[in-house]
Amino acid sequence: MAELIIQTKKIKDNIKFLSNYFDEHNIHWSLVTKVFSGDKEFLENILTDDVIEKIDSVGDSRLTSLKNLKAVNPKMKTIYIKPPAKIYADEVVQYADISLNSSLSTIKILNEAARKAKKTHQIIIMIELGELREGVQRSEIISFYEKVFELSNIEVIGIGSNLGCMYGVEPTYDKLLQLCLYKELISTKFNKVLKFISGGTSITLPLIENKTIPKDINHFRVGEAAFFGISPLDNKKFKELSVDTFEFSANIIELEEKKIVPDGVISDANIGHTAEYDDNDVGETSIKAILDFGLLDVDKEDIDAIDDELDFVGVTSDMIVIDIGTNRNKEGKKKYSIGDKIRFKPNYMAVARLLNSKFIDKRFL
């Protein structure tokens, strides 16, 4: 089987680096593990006591994942990082110590669930700052907070926002300053202390380094930088973080010289995408390899071959075809044989899908 290789030590070192980095800048943070879909083996390998000791909470967007987090470490503080569905209020209160919210009616249901469970559920209220994803409209903030403050089993611990996730609206100084000003307005009007201004994610990290982030932004929710070493703002390595944390390896199950142009009537019945060719390719051949993974496992757009001389040809549900040219290296020796592996560098979405595939092995190094 094809396999995802996980560099455990590099990931753990990344998390420890971020913990120290945030500590130096007086910032709290939540580690977002949603890329791993609650995989218990991953959680047990990565979230050891020495890794999570400086993390405020560990977050996910799936209740099953939060359940697994609690199963691995019942004392771990968890955060549900998207507005909950009302129907799952009891489970949210059971498995999430904190949740991000933007719906008053949902918060009221959470309050009832917390009251039944004899708990106080903590929430961060999300504000819409232009990304058009989750968030209370700015014109409704005061009345929204006023109603939430009346609830008996809900503790509002912060204000937050999501930027750069859907439309790619950048988290600029001015955008984040708005969040800080709303926090001051709420604190003053209601005489309440809001512990967190949660305006930071992996995309916001460069703003800390460039000193272009408002000083009151004191909570980050970070996943991609911790596990892949980059900030999505520029897709570049952030400081000393490691970017070589994952590798995807697939097996060559067929290796043959074949025509470049298909033979027959081509219809829309194929489920894959094919490489382009022109009339000059008619009669020409190249050596093609079939690998043991397909569309069900990962999108080919989310993986890059380590060998940059390989070209994508086509894909089906469980196999992918690549063109390896003459199959000779610069010295004229044969490069690949049946049974050899082709290595790829996966991005965030690739790792998320590969970990969800039951047809892909995992190997922790």
Image: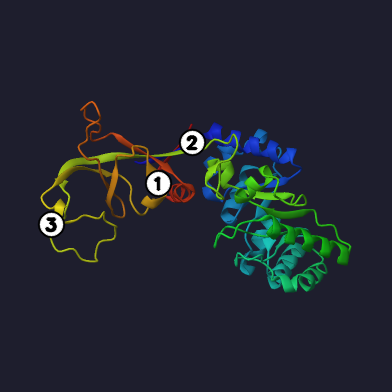
Secondary element at image label 2: loop
* Picture residue at 74% right of the left edge, 68% below the top: 112
Please tell me how crowded label 3 is: few (under 14), some (14-19), or many (20+) other residues with Cα within 10 Å: few
Picture quarter containing residue 272?
bottom left
* Picture residue at 20% right of the left edge, 37% below the top: 326
Please tell me how crowded label 1 is: few (under 14), some (14-19), or many (20+) other residues with Cα within 10 Å: some
Disc on the earlier residue, 2 or 1: 2
Q: Do residues under tags 2 and 1 come within 8 Å of each other at their CB atoms?
A: no
| Structural distance between the alpha carbons of marks 3 and 2 | 41 Å
Secondary element at image label 1: strand
* Depth check, front residue: 130 or 347: 130
Disc on the earlier residue, 3 or 2: 2
- Under mark 1, the amino acid is Ile
- Residue 210 appears anywhere in the view: yes
Picture quarter containing residue 46?
top right
Please tell me how crowded label 2 is: few (under 14), some (14-19), or many (20+) other residues with Cα within 10 Å: some
Place of residue 289 in the rendered image (x, y in percent of width and height, measured from the top left): 24, 42
Place of residue 347 in the rendered image (x, y in percent of width and height, measured from the top left): 46, 46
Disc on the earlier residue, 1 or 3: 3
Mark 2 highlights which residue?
244
- Residue 70 appears anywhere in the view: no
| Structural distance between the alpha carbons of marks 2 and 1 | 13 Å
Q: Residue 85 carries which label?
A: none
Q: In the image, 269: left or right of 196?
A: left
Mark 1 highlights which residue?
303
- Under mark 2, the amino acid is Asp
Place of residue 84 in the rendered image (x, y in percent of width and height, measured from the top left): 63, 64
Q: Relative to residue 43, is residue 278 depicted above or below?
A: below
Secondary element at image label 3: loop
